[in-house]
Image (cartoon, rainbow, N blue to C red):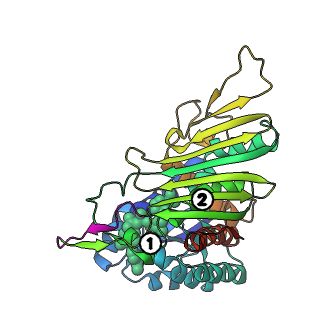
Amino acid sequence: MNTIGVGLIGTGYMGKCHALAWNAVTPVFGDALRPRLVHLAEVSPELAAQKADEFGFAKATGDWRVLIADPDVAVVSITTPNQFHAEMAIAALEAGKHVWCEKPMAVSLADAERMAAAAQRSGTVAALGYNYIQNPAIRQIGALIAEGAIGVVNHVRLEMDEDFMADPAAQFYWKSQASSGYGALDDFGVHPLSLLTVLLGRVERVCATMAKPYPTRPTPGGGQRPVETWDIANVMLEIEGGISGILALNRAAWGRKGRLALQLFGSGGTIVYDQERMNEFSIYRADESTGTQGFTNVLMGPAHEPYQHFVPAPGHGLGFNDLKVIEAHEVLAAIAGRPARIIDFVGGLQIEQAVHAMAHSHHSGEWVTL
Ligand SMILES: NC(=O)c1ccc[n+]([C@@H]2O[C@H](COP(=O)([O-])OP(=O)(O)OC[C@H]3O[C@@H](n4cnc5c(N)ncnc54)[C@H](O)[C@@H]3O)[C@@H](O)[C@H]2O)c1
Protein backbone atom coordinates (compact mmCIF):
# COMPACT_ATOMS: atom_id res chain seq x y z
CA MET A 1 0.00 0.00 0.00
CA ASN A 2 1.33 3.46 -0.91
CA THR A 3 1.87 5.86 1.97
CA ILE A 4 1.55 9.62 2.38
CA GLY A 5 3.27 11.84 4.96
CA VAL A 6 0.94 13.80 7.25
CA GLY A 7 1.60 17.01 9.18
CA LEU A 8 -0.78 18.25 11.91
CA ILE A 9 -0.87 21.86 13.14
CA GLY A 10 -2.83 22.27 16.38
CA THR A 11 -3.80 19.55 18.84
CA GLY A 12 -6.91 20.85 20.62
CA TYR A 13 -10.45 19.60 20.06
CA MET A 14 -10.16 19.32 16.28
CA GLY A 15 -6.46 18.41 16.24
CA LYS A 16 -7.27 15.28 18.19
CA CYS A 17 -10.16 14.49 15.78
CA HIS A 18 -7.79 14.76 12.79
CA ALA A 19 -5.17 12.62 14.56
CA LEU A 20 -7.79 9.94 15.33
CA ALA A 21 -9.01 10.06 11.73
CA TRP A 22 -5.52 9.74 10.22
CA ASN A 23 -4.88 6.78 12.56
CA ALA A 24 -8.20 5.04 11.76
CA VAL A 25 -8.71 5.63 8.04
CA THR A 26 -6.68 2.67 6.77
CA PRO A 27 -8.08 0.07 9.20
CA VAL A 28 -11.63 1.30 8.48
CA PHE A 29 -11.46 1.64 4.69
CA GLY A 30 -8.47 -0.43 3.66
CA ASP A 31 -8.32 1.02 0.16
CA ALA A 32 -6.85 4.42 0.98
CA LEU A 33 -3.32 5.72 0.80
CA ARG A 34 -1.87 4.80 4.19
CA PRO A 35 -1.10 7.96 6.23
CA ARG A 36 2.34 8.16 7.89
CA LEU A 37 2.19 10.51 10.88
CA VAL A 38 5.32 12.52 10.18
CA HIS A 39 5.29 15.91 11.90
CA LEU A 40 3.20 17.77 14.49
CA ALA A 41 3.28 21.50 15.37
CA GLU A 42 2.00 23.30 18.45
CA VAL A 43 2.59 26.64 20.13
CA SER A 44 5.60 25.35 22.10
CA PRO A 45 8.15 22.58 21.48
CA GLU A 46 7.16 20.98 24.82
CA LEU A 47 3.44 20.73 23.99
CA ALA A 48 4.27 19.56 20.47
CA ALA A 49 6.55 16.80 21.80
CA GLN A 50 3.92 15.65 24.31
CA LYS A 51 1.14 15.54 21.69
CA ALA A 52 3.37 13.91 19.05
CA ASP A 53 4.01 11.15 21.56
CA GLU A 54 0.29 10.76 22.39
CA PHE A 55 -0.96 10.96 18.79
CA GLY A 56 1.86 8.88 17.26
CA PHE A 57 3.71 11.51 15.18
CA ALA A 58 7.45 10.98 14.55
CA LYS A 59 8.61 14.61 14.77
CA ALA A 60 7.46 17.63 16.79
CA THR A 61 8.02 21.37 16.45
CA GLY A 62 6.99 24.60 18.13
CA ASP A 63 7.15 26.36 14.74
CA TRP A 64 4.52 25.38 12.16
CA ARG A 65 6.71 26.76 9.35
CA VAL A 66 9.26 24.02 10.08
CA LEU A 67 6.51 21.42 9.55
CA ILE A 68 5.49 22.97 6.23
CA ALA A 69 9.13 22.99 5.07
CA ASP A 70 9.48 19.27 5.89
CA PRO A 71 9.83 17.38 2.57
CA ASP A 72 8.37 14.25 4.22
CA VAL A 73 5.03 16.04 4.78
CA ALA A 74 2.69 15.83 1.75
CA VAL A 75 -0.64 16.74 3.40
CA VAL A 76 -1.17 19.25 6.21
CA SER A 77 -4.07 19.20 8.68
CA ILE A 78 -4.76 22.74 9.95
CA THR A 79 -6.74 22.69 13.19
CA THR A 80 -5.70 26.00 14.75
CA PRO A 81 -8.06 28.88 15.65
CA ASN A 82 -9.74 30.58 12.71
CA GLN A 83 -7.42 33.58 12.44
CA PHE A 84 -4.44 31.33 11.53
CA HIS A 85 -6.12 29.34 8.73
CA ALA A 86 -5.30 31.71 5.85
CA GLU A 87 -1.61 32.20 6.61
CA MET A 88 -0.98 28.50 7.32
CA ALA A 89 -3.04 27.15 4.41
CA ILE A 90 -1.54 29.53 1.86
CA ALA A 91 2.00 28.71 3.07
CA ALA A 92 1.27 24.98 2.81
CA LEU A 93 -0.27 25.30 -0.67
CA GLU A 94 2.65 27.42 -1.88
CA ALA A 95 4.98 24.68 -0.64
CA GLY A 96 3.08 22.21 -2.86
CA LYS A 97 1.29 20.42 0.00
CA HIS A 98 -2.25 19.13 0.08
CA VAL A 99 -4.33 20.82 2.80
CA TRP A 100 -7.18 19.70 5.05
CA CYS A 101 -8.21 22.88 6.89
CA GLU A 102 -10.83 23.26 9.58
CA LYS A 103 -13.84 25.49 9.08
CA PRO A 104 -14.54 28.36 8.87
CA MET A 105 -12.19 28.86 5.95
CA ALA A 106 -10.99 32.29 7.14
CA VAL A 107 -12.05 35.27 9.18
CA SER A 108 -12.20 37.79 6.32
CA LEU A 109 -13.58 37.38 2.82
CA ALA A 110 -10.32 38.75 1.42
CA ASP A 111 -8.39 35.95 3.17
CA ALA A 112 -10.84 33.31 1.88
CA GLU A 113 -10.37 34.69 -1.65
CA ARG A 114 -6.57 34.52 -1.25
CA MET A 115 -6.89 30.91 -0.03
CA ALA A 116 -9.09 29.89 -2.99
CA ALA A 117 -6.64 31.56 -5.41
CA ALA A 118 -3.67 29.80 -3.75
CA ALA A 119 -5.50 26.46 -4.05
CA GLN A 120 -6.18 27.01 -7.75
CA ARG A 121 -2.54 27.99 -8.34
CA SER A 122 -1.14 24.98 -6.44
CA GLY A 123 -3.30 22.33 -8.10
CA THR A 124 -3.06 20.28 -4.92
CA VAL A 125 -6.10 19.20 -2.88
CA ALA A 126 -7.44 21.91 -0.54
CA ALA A 127 -10.32 20.50 1.52
CA LEU A 128 -12.33 22.06 4.34
CA GLY A 129 -13.49 20.35 7.55
CA TYR A 130 -17.19 20.14 6.71
CA ASN A 131 -17.64 16.80 8.47
CA TYR A 132 -21.45 16.81 8.65
CA ILE A 133 -21.77 16.37 4.87
CA GLN A 134 -20.07 12.98 5.38
CA ASN A 135 -22.87 11.53 7.54
CA PRO A 136 -24.45 8.48 5.80
CA ALA A 137 -27.84 9.98 6.77
CA ILE A 138 -27.07 13.20 4.87
CA ARG A 139 -25.87 11.18 1.87
CA GLN A 140 -29.12 9.18 1.93
CA ILE A 141 -31.21 12.34 2.25
CA GLY A 142 -29.35 13.74 -0.78
CA ALA A 143 -30.13 10.60 -2.78
CA LEU A 144 -33.81 10.80 -1.78
CA ILE A 145 -34.05 14.45 -2.86
CA ALA A 146 -32.37 13.62 -6.17
CA GLU A 147 -34.81 10.79 -6.90
CA GLY A 148 -37.78 13.04 -6.09
CA ALA A 149 -38.90 11.13 -3.00
CA ILE A 150 -40.40 14.32 -1.53
CA GLY A 151 -41.22 15.91 -4.88
CA VAL A 152 -39.81 19.36 -5.64
CA VAL A 153 -38.21 20.92 -2.55
CA ASN A 154 -39.64 24.40 -1.94
CA HIS A 155 -38.70 25.25 1.66
CA VAL A 156 -35.86 24.43 4.05
CA ARG A 157 -35.43 25.21 7.74
CA LEU A 158 -31.95 24.92 9.21
CA GLU A 159 -31.01 25.31 12.86
CA MET A 160 -27.70 24.99 14.66
CA ASP A 161 -27.70 25.31 18.45
CA GLU A 162 -25.25 24.47 21.22
CA ASP A 163 -24.96 25.73 24.77
CA PHE A 164 -21.23 26.24 25.30
CA MET A 165 -21.78 30.04 25.44
CA ALA A 166 -25.12 29.84 27.30
CA ASP A 167 -23.73 30.49 30.78
CA PRO A 168 -23.37 34.25 31.37
CA ALA A 169 -20.48 33.36 33.73
CA ALA A 170 -18.53 31.57 30.95
CA GLN A 171 -15.20 33.32 30.50
CA PHE A 172 -14.19 35.55 27.62
CA TYR A 173 -11.99 33.49 25.23
CA TRP A 174 -10.87 33.49 21.60
CA LYS A 175 -14.38 32.81 20.28
CA SER A 176 -15.50 36.03 22.03
CA GLN A 177 -12.94 38.05 20.06
CA ALA A 178 -13.64 39.74 16.72
CA SER A 179 -10.40 38.23 15.43
CA SER A 180 -12.20 34.83 15.40
CA GLY A 181 -14.98 36.15 13.11
CA TYR A 182 -18.60 37.25 13.58
CA GLY A 183 -19.61 34.54 16.08
CA ALA A 184 -22.48 32.10 15.47
CA LEU A 185 -22.68 33.16 11.83
CA ASP A 186 -19.29 31.82 10.77
CA ASP A 187 -18.53 29.50 13.70
CA PHE A 188 -21.87 27.69 13.23
CA GLY A 189 -23.56 28.99 10.10
CA VAL A 190 -21.00 27.48 7.78
CA HIS A 191 -22.04 23.94 8.84
CA PRO A 192 -25.72 24.19 7.79
CA LEU A 193 -24.54 26.06 4.69
CA SER A 194 -22.30 23.07 3.89
CA LEU A 195 -25.41 20.84 4.06
CA LEU A 196 -27.24 23.24 1.73
CA THR A 197 -24.27 23.08 -0.66
CA VAL A 198 -24.46 19.29 -1.04
CA LEU A 199 -28.25 18.93 -0.78
CA LEU A 200 -29.81 21.90 -2.59
CA GLY A 201 -27.32 24.34 -4.11
CA ARG A 202 -26.23 27.96 -3.78
CA VAL A 203 -27.63 30.70 -1.58
CA GLU A 204 -28.68 33.64 -3.78
CA ARG A 205 -30.10 36.29 -1.37
CA VAL A 206 -29.98 36.78 2.41
CA CYS A 207 -31.48 38.98 5.09
CA ALA A 208 -29.95 38.59 8.57
CA THR A 209 -29.85 39.90 12.12
CA MET A 210 -27.36 38.99 14.85
CA ALA A 211 -27.64 39.33 18.64
CA LYS A 212 -25.40 39.27 21.73
CA PRO A 213 -27.22 37.64 24.67
CA TYR A 214 -24.41 38.73 27.03
CA PRO A 215 -22.62 41.96 26.04
CA THR A 216 -19.75 41.35 28.51
CA ARG A 217 -18.01 38.24 29.86
CA PRO A 218 -15.73 37.64 32.86
CA THR A 219 -11.95 37.63 32.41
CA PRO A 220 -9.48 35.45 34.36
CA GLY A 221 -8.39 38.56 36.35
CA GLY A 222 -11.91 38.95 37.78
CA GLY A 223 -13.00 41.82 35.51
CA GLN A 224 -15.52 42.01 32.65
CA ARG A 225 -14.64 42.43 28.97
CA PRO A 226 -17.02 43.50 26.17
CA VAL A 227 -17.94 40.55 23.93
CA GLU A 228 -16.94 41.27 20.33
CA THR A 229 -18.88 38.44 18.62
CA TRP A 230 -22.59 37.60 18.21
CA ASP A 231 -23.71 34.27 19.70
CA ILE A 232 -27.12 34.39 17.94
CA ALA A 233 -28.02 34.90 14.27
CA ASN A 234 -31.32 34.69 12.36
CA VAL A 235 -31.29 34.58 8.57
CA MET A 236 -33.88 34.46 5.80
CA LEU A 237 -32.55 32.77 2.67
CA GLU A 238 -33.37 32.54 -1.01
CA ILE A 239 -31.71 29.46 -2.51
CA GLU A 240 -31.24 28.57 -6.18
CA GLY A 241 -34.22 26.86 -7.76
CA GLY A 242 -36.66 29.21 -6.00
CA ILE A 243 -36.31 27.50 -2.61
CA SER A 244 -37.01 29.66 0.44
CA GLY A 245 -35.13 29.06 3.65
CA ILE A 246 -34.67 29.97 7.29
CA LEU A 247 -31.38 29.63 9.17
CA ALA A 248 -31.38 30.02 12.97
CA LEU A 249 -28.10 29.87 14.93
CA ASN A 250 -27.45 30.04 18.67
CA ARG A 251 -24.27 29.25 20.62
CA ALA A 252 -26.02 30.18 23.89
CA ALA A 253 -28.97 27.76 23.70
CA TRP A 254 -29.19 25.95 27.05
CA GLY A 255 -29.87 22.25 26.63
CA ARG A 256 -28.85 22.06 22.98
CA LYS A 257 -25.62 20.06 22.75
CA GLY A 258 -25.06 19.50 19.06
CA ARG A 259 -28.27 20.40 17.26
CA LEU A 260 -27.81 20.73 13.53
CA ALA A 261 -31.37 20.31 12.42
CA LEU A 262 -32.81 20.22 8.97
CA GLN A 263 -36.41 20.22 7.74
CA LEU A 264 -36.87 19.88 3.99
CA PHE A 265 -40.37 20.48 2.67
CA GLY A 266 -41.30 19.40 -0.85
CA SER A 267 -44.34 19.08 -3.09
CA GLY A 268 -44.57 15.38 -2.22
CA GLY A 269 -43.32 15.09 1.35
CA THR A 270 -40.98 16.19 4.13
CA ILE A 271 -37.61 15.03 5.47
CA VAL A 272 -36.50 15.79 9.04
CA TYR A 273 -32.97 15.30 10.46
CA ASP A 274 -31.07 16.37 13.57
CA GLN A 275 -27.36 15.76 14.21
CA GLU A 276 -28.18 15.10 17.89
CA ARG A 277 -29.83 11.91 16.52
CA MET A 278 -27.23 11.54 13.78
CA ASN A 279 -27.96 7.89 12.99
CA GLU A 280 -31.51 8.44 11.81
CA PHE A 281 -33.84 10.66 9.83
CA SER A 282 -37.59 10.78 9.22
CA ILE A 283 -39.49 10.98 5.97
CA TYR A 284 -43.15 11.73 5.32
CA ARG A 285 -44.51 10.86 1.89
CA ALA A 286 -47.73 12.44 0.71
CA ASP A 287 -48.45 9.43 -1.52
CA GLU A 288 -48.69 6.95 1.41
CA SER A 289 -52.20 5.63 1.96
CA THR A 290 -54.05 7.83 4.41
CA GLY A 291 -54.58 4.98 6.88
CA THR A 292 -50.83 4.60 7.55
CA GLN A 293 -49.64 8.08 6.64
CA GLY A 294 -47.08 9.54 9.03
CA PHE A 295 -43.34 10.07 9.47
CA THR A 296 -41.22 6.94 8.93
CA ASN A 297 -38.04 6.79 11.00
CA VAL A 298 -35.06 5.40 9.07
CA LEU A 299 -32.13 4.02 11.10
CA MET A 300 -28.71 3.99 9.47
CA GLY A 301 -27.17 0.63 8.57
CA PRO A 302 -24.86 -1.05 6.04
CA ALA A 303 -27.18 -0.04 3.18
CA HIS A 304 -26.21 3.58 3.79
CA GLU A 305 -22.75 4.24 2.36
CA PRO A 306 -20.15 4.24 3.97
CA TYR A 307 -21.62 2.97 7.27
CA GLN A 308 -20.69 -0.64 6.42
CA HIS A 309 -16.97 0.10 6.69
CA PHE A 310 -17.35 0.77 10.41
CA VAL A 311 -19.78 -1.93 11.56
CA PRO A 312 -21.72 -4.65 9.70
CA ALA A 313 -24.80 -4.46 11.92
CA PRO A 314 -27.60 -1.92 11.25
CA GLY A 315 -28.76 0.46 13.95
CA HIS A 316 -25.53 0.31 15.98
CA GLY A 317 -24.63 3.87 15.12
CA LEU A 318 -21.65 5.96 14.05
CA GLY A 319 -20.27 8.89 16.05
CA PHE A 320 -18.86 12.35 15.39
CA ASN A 321 -15.27 11.09 15.12
CA ASP A 322 -16.37 8.56 12.49
CA LEU A 323 -17.45 11.48 10.28
CA LYS A 324 -13.88 12.75 10.51
CA VAL A 325 -12.59 9.30 9.47
CA ILE A 326 -14.89 9.39 6.43
CA GLU A 327 -13.67 12.93 5.69
CA ALA A 328 -10.02 11.80 5.87
CA HIS A 329 -10.90 9.01 3.43
CA GLU A 330 -12.46 11.53 1.02
CA VAL A 331 -9.38 13.79 1.29
CA LEU A 332 -7.17 10.80 0.45
CA ALA A 333 -9.45 9.86 -2.46
CA ALA A 334 -9.13 13.40 -3.84
CA ILE A 335 -5.33 13.22 -3.46
CA ALA A 336 -5.36 9.91 -5.36
CA GLY A 337 -7.33 11.62 -8.15
CA ARG A 338 -10.59 9.75 -7.48
CA PRO A 339 -14.04 11.41 -7.23
CA ALA A 340 -14.38 12.71 -3.68
CA ARG A 341 -17.10 14.22 -1.53
CA ILE A 342 -15.26 17.27 -0.22
CA ILE A 343 -15.98 20.98 -0.13
CA ASP A 344 -12.75 22.44 -1.46
CA PHE A 345 -11.49 26.01 -1.12
CA VAL A 346 -13.33 27.12 -4.26
CA GLY A 347 -16.65 25.66 -3.03
CA GLY A 348 -15.83 26.92 0.46
CA LEU A 349 -15.45 30.44 -0.87
CA GLN A 350 -19.15 30.40 -1.86
CA ILE A 351 -20.05 29.54 1.74
CA GLU A 352 -17.84 32.39 2.97
CA GLN A 353 -19.49 34.79 0.50
CA ALA A 354 -22.90 33.82 1.93
CA VAL A 355 -21.71 34.36 5.52
CA HIS A 356 -20.23 37.79 4.78
CA ALA A 357 -23.39 38.76 2.87
CA MET A 358 -25.39 37.86 6.01
CA ALA A 359 -23.13 40.03 8.20
CA HIS A 360 -23.46 42.85 5.68
CA SER A 361 -27.25 42.47 5.80
CA HIS A 362 -27.21 42.69 9.62
CA HIS A 363 -25.33 45.99 9.47
CA SER A 364 -27.27 47.48 6.54
CA GLY A 365 -30.69 46.18 7.60
CA GLU A 366 -31.35 45.16 3.99
CA TRP A 367 -31.52 42.05 1.81
CA VAL A 368 -28.17 41.31 0.15
CA THR A 369 -27.83 39.55 -3.22
CA LEU A 370 -24.78 37.32 -3.64
N1 LIG B 1 -15.46 20.68 12.02
C1 LIG B 1 -16.01 20.86 13.20
O1 LIG B 1 -17.06 20.31 13.50
C2 LIG B 1 -15.31 21.77 14.19
C3 LIG B 1 -15.63 21.70 15.55
C4 LIG B 1 -14.91 22.51 16.44
C5 LIG B 1 -13.95 23.39 15.97
N2 LIG B 1 -13.70 23.45 14.63
C6 LIG B 1 -12.67 24.38 14.12
O2 LIG B 1 -11.39 23.85 14.41
C7 LIG B 1 -10.48 24.93 14.65
C8 LIG B 1 -9.83 24.73 16.01
O3 LIG B 1 -10.83 24.73 16.98
P1 LIG B 1 -10.64 23.89 18.33
O4 LIG B 1 -11.98 23.87 18.98
O5 LIG B 1 -9.95 22.61 18.03
O6 LIG B 1 -9.66 24.86 19.12
P2 LIG B 1 -8.73 24.49 20.35
O7 LIG B 1 -8.51 25.77 21.05
O8 LIG B 1 -9.26 23.32 21.09
O9 LIG B 1 -7.37 24.02 19.64
C9 LIG B 1 -6.57 24.88 18.88
C10 LIG B 1 -5.14 24.36 19.00
O10 LIG B 1 -4.32 25.13 18.11
C11 LIG B 1 -3.10 25.39 18.79
N3 LIG B 1 -2.46 26.56 18.18
C12 LIG B 1 -2.84 27.86 18.26
N4 LIG B 1 -1.98 28.62 17.56
C13 LIG B 1 -1.05 27.78 17.02
C14 LIG B 1 0.11 28.01 16.23
N5 LIG B 1 0.48 29.23 15.82
N6 LIG B 1 0.85 26.92 15.88
C15 LIG B 1 0.50 25.68 16.27
N7 LIG B 1 -0.60 25.43 17.05
C16 LIG B 1 -1.34 26.47 17.43
C17 LIG B 1 -3.53 25.64 20.23
O11 LIG B 1 -2.44 25.53 21.14
C18 LIG B 1 -4.57 24.54 20.41
O12 LIG B 1 -4.00 23.32 20.83
C19 LIG B 1 -11.28 26.23 14.56
O13 LIG B 1 -11.12 26.78 13.30
C20 LIG B 1 -12.71 25.75 14.75
O14 LIG B 1 -13.67 26.59 14.11
C21 LIG B 1 -14.33 22.64 13.74
Q: Is mark 2 within 8 Å of ligand 1?
A: no
Residue 108 magenta-drawn? no
Q: Is residue 11 visible?
A: no
Q: Residues within 10 Å of mark 1 (few under 14, many from 20)?
A: many
Q: In terms of depth relative to the viewer, which is nearer, 112 or 357?
A: 357
> Closer to the camera: disc 1 or disc 2?
2
Task: Give how far apart the Cα atoms at labels 1 and 2 are.
Answer: 28 Å
Query: Residues in magenta?
Result: 212-222
Quarter of the figure with residue 216: bottom left
Q: Secondary structure at mark 1?
A: loop
Left/right placement of residue 104 relative to residue 193 reads: left
Quarter of the figure with residue 349: bottom right
Q: Is residue 36 above or below residue 322?
A: below
Left/right placement of residue 28 relative to residue 167 reads: right
Q: Position of residue 40 (x, y in %)?
A: 42, 73
- Amino acid type, residue under disc 1 in the picture: Thr
Q: Is residue 264 visible?
A: yes
Image quarter where ligand 1 lies: bottom left
Q: Is residue 147 above or below residue 293?
A: below
Q: Main secondary structure of the magenta part?
A: loop
Q: In terms of depth relative to the viewer, which is nearer, 186 or 211?
A: 211
Image quarter in which the C terminus is found: bottom right
Circle 1 is placed at which residue position? 80
Q: Is mark 1 within 8 Å of ligand 1?
A: yes
Q: In terms of depth relative to the viewer, which is nearer, 348 or 306?
A: 348
What number is the disc on residue 235? 2
The number of callouts visible is 2
- Amino acid type, residue under disc 2 in the picture: Val
